[in-house]
Image: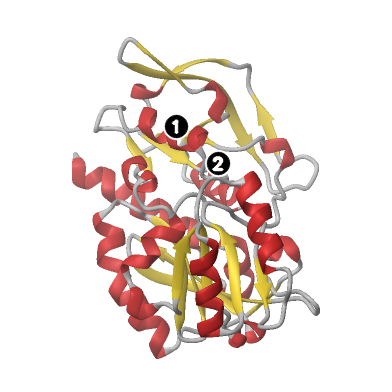
Amino acid sequence: MPLTVAIQMDPIDRIDIGGDSTFALALEAQNRGHKIWYYLPKHLAQRDGKISTRAHMLAVRNERGNHFTLGPQQPLDLSTVDVVLLRQDPPFDMGYITTTHILERLPKRVLVVNDPYWVRNSPEKVFVTDYPDLMPPTLITSDPETIRAFRAEHGEIVIKPLYGNGGAGVFRIQPGDENLNAMMEFFGAFVREPMMVQRYEAKVRQGDKRIILVDGEPVGAINRVPAKGEARSNMHVGGKPEKTELTARDKEICARLGPELKRRGLIFTGIDVIGDYLTEINVTSPTGIWEIKRFEGTDIAGLIWTAIENRLTARA
């Protein structure tokens, strides 16, 4: 049955259609005959108990430079749609968190993907710490002395903003690096949140594996190899995608996480694995659909929409 879908996302004119997973989801929705609305987070509104936005009807095409057509902007009562895709990119700041509070107040018949309550309460670099036995040694703190002690214990470390994304602000600190104190001062001056500090895993040179799970089940993976002279594997900063397969350890990690992801209504998630270690659980705006389709042929957008449609059927 055709659905009415509203997509909350970043400006569609700025996306790279060759790598944008939200665009892949929009294409698949359109191919299934669903009616698509598009709106920006800033247009979301709550008034007198009702959730609305100003939105455009959206048509999409897989053509660079000509990938979308918008209808005139008009008011949209979000209680009248079947599905809301919560797909704007981080940073996971108070603006982002506020959208989850608003969307959570929609009638239960409207399926928000991913579930806004659990998006808010599963911060990607905090949620992952529920599985310490699957992770490398990890510290979350703002305290410089504690960070220095952690480096003294583990030697080479990686420091990350707790609510960052795309590899921004990620630093590799080697044992003799004299910049640690200055870096902590810099973070302290501009960021109020604690930092995540992890033991550096040398196997990142062989790649940082992104595994996609749909409704708690692993459906595909891509390996991202850092560029020469770069410690980060994110494709935003030059990481090279490569075909990969799930190892026994990868499957063990997915089996541990899957039931909880499903329970939380996190239909589309991406986890990051370096060697034998889980490093992150991505729930806000996971990516990787196009890369996995190119290397494996797996239609993850189709699997996601089937999972969404099954959820709605089960609710009926």
Q: Amino acid at mark 2?
A: Gln
Return the mark for residue 99: 1
Q: Is residue 25 above or below residue 238?
A: above
Nearest the eye: 93 or 172: 172
Looking at the image, the residue that sits furthest to the bottom is: 248
Circle 1: element type: helix
Nearest the eye: 83 or 279: 279
Q: Position of residue 312 (x, y in %)?
A: 27, 43
**Could you tell whether 122 is left or right of 38 in the image?**
left
Nearest the eye: 186 or 269: 186
Circle 2: element type: loop
Q: Residue at x 50, y 54 (%)?
A: 194
Return the mark for residue 88: 2
Q: Is residue 23 visible?
A: yes
**Where on the picture, by quarter, is residue 243?**
bottom right
- The answer to whether mark 2 and mark 1 are in CB contact below 8 A is yes
Callout 2 crowding tier (Cα within 10 Å): few <14, some 14–19, many ≥20? some
